[in-house]
Image (spheres, rainbow, N blue to C red):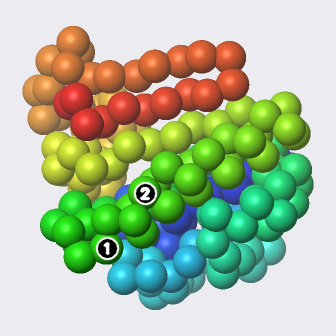
Amino acid sequence: MKKMLVTGGAGFIGSNFVHHVIDNYPNYFVTVVDKLTYAGNMQSLAGLSEDRFEFVKGDICDAELMDDLVDKNDYIVHFAAESHNDNSLNDPLLFVKMNTWGTGVILEAVRKADKKIVAASIEDPNYALVCETAYELNLPSIEAAYEHLKIPEGQRRFYYKKRLHHVSTDEV
């Protein structure tokens, strides 16, 4: 069985991704790590089979935890982030810590373990619309949602490198 770590998997987009993987890929076991701040909700993970899913309450800035979790998984999908940019006005350093340092901690764990990662930038409201459309219409993929919404291919930004597969949605 393949093992996948999903950071921020109790958030709106992350949890929908986890449900999609569990529902459509029976040979995957998914570990979710989430700090459960304002954006994370355990209810969004309700109904997942415990023989294919585990939850770890944790912080992506915890290097020891991330080293351990990354090492135990074949694939890493990174959704964890502080969102709602207006909140950054109240605590800008929290955004820097989580979105920059936390991502750096994950990337270092990935580098040390020689794994691959998919990192998703989800600040753009169009991406939320694309994911919501895929979910509501039960479309087979995000790409199908882009097509359904008639977003031109040139505006879909996917960057692939050896180790980091970055889905940049802030330019969609």
Please identify the quarter of the rendering in which residue 147 is found: top left
| Residue beneath the point at 49% across and 49% down | 100
Helix, strand or loop under label 1: loop
Looking at the image, which residue sits at the far front? 93
Name the residue nearer the viewer: 15 or 28.
15
Residue 129 drawn at (x, y percent): 18, 50
Q: Identify which amino acid the numbered label 2 is placed on.
A: Val
Q: Is residue 56 left or right of residue 23?
A: right
Please identify the quarter of the rendering in which residue 168 is found: top left
Please identify the quarter of the rendering in which residue 140 is found: top left
Residue 75 drawn at (x, y percent): 72, 43
Callout 1: 10 Å neighbours few (<14), some, many (20+)? few
| Residue beneath the point at 25% across and 37% down | 170
Name the residue nearer the viewer: 48 or 14.
14
| Residue beneath the point at 43% across and 32% down | 167
Helix, strand or loop under label 2: helix
| Residue beneath the point at 21% across and 12% down | 154
| Residue 105 badge | none
Residue 124 drawn at (x, y percent): 21, 45
- Number of on-image labels: 2
Mark 2–mark 1 Cα distance, whole angstroms, equals: 9 Å
Q: Is residue 19 visible?
A: no
Name the residue nearer the viewer: 58 or 55.
58
Q: Identify which amino acid the numbered label 1 is placed on.
A: Asp
Q: Is residue 14 above or below residue 155?
A: below
Q: Is residue 77 visible?
A: yes
| Residue 91 badge | 1
Residue 116 drawn at (x, y percent): 71, 33
Question: Which residue in the protein does label 2 denote?
Answer: 96
Q: Is residue 104 above or below residue 136?
A: above
Q: Earlier in the sequence, mark 2 or mark 1?
A: 1
